[in-house]
Image: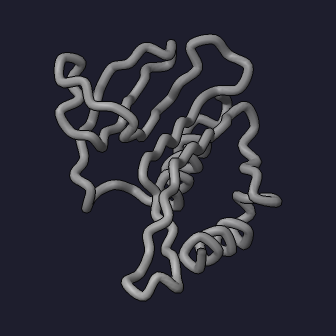
């Protein structure tokens, strides 16, 4: 939680995050995570780890609105998903144009995705 709180504090200070809701006009970042609890050997403490992720940036109230989506929910080699961790990139009409593959060590944290989404917003303020 410390990493999350530190990142959220930084985003609050930058004015990007208000009450843990992102303030971009006409953009939504949907975050879905599947969490698991692992136990230490003494069984007295648990550690919560993210298992599956989906970070989906899309335009609000627009059909075919995806901008990008990081996920590891599925692997489909015939659709270009060789790696479990990948990013779907969409054109301005919501058509998938690219799948970028990642190794686990290169997988972005939520704070990195928020930074990327904020940069997209700043670059495309009229979305």
Q: Nearer the viewer, residue 41 or 94?
A: 41
User: Is 93 placed left or right of 104 in the picture?
Assistant: right
Q: Nearer the viewer, residue 126 or 15?
A: 15
The residue that appears at 53% across and 61% down in the rendered structure is 111
Residue 26 location (% of width, % of height):
73, 31
Q: Is residue 109 above or below residue 52?
A: below
The residue that appears at 59% across and 70% down in the rendered structure is 4
Residue furthest right as drawn: 19
Residue 114 location (% of width, % of height):
56, 53
The quadrant the C terminus occupies is: top right
The quadrant the N terminus occupies is: bottom right
The residue that appears at 31% across and 39% down in the rendered structure is 86
Q: Nearer the viewer, residue 53 or 48?
A: 48
User: Is 82 placed left or right of 74 in the picture?
Assistant: left
Residue furthest front as drawn: 43
Q: Nearer the viewer, residue 4 or 33?
A: 33
Q: Quadrant of residue 106?
A: bottom left
Q: Quadrant of residue 126?
A: top right
User: Is 87 placed left or right of 17 in the picture?
Assistant: left
Residue 33 location (% of width, % of height):
53, 48
The residue that appears at 45% across and 60% down in the rendered structure is 109
């Amino acid at each position: 939680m410390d990493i999350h709180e530190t990142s959220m504090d930084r985003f609050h200070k930058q004015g990007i995050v208000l009450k843990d809701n992102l303030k971009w006009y006409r953009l939504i970042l949907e975050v879905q995570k599947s969490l698991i609890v692992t136990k230490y050997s003494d069984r007295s403490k648990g550690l919560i780890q993210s298992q599956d992720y989906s970070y989906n940036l899309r335009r609000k109230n627009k059909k075919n609105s995806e901008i990008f989506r990081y996920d590891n929910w599925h692997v489909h080699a015939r659709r270009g998903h060789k790696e479990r961790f990948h990013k779907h990139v969409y054109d301005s009409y919501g058509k998938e144009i690219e799948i970028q593959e990642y190794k686990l060590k290169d997988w972005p944290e939520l704070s990195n995705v928020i930074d990327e989404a904020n940069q997209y917003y700043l670059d495309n303020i009229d979305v």
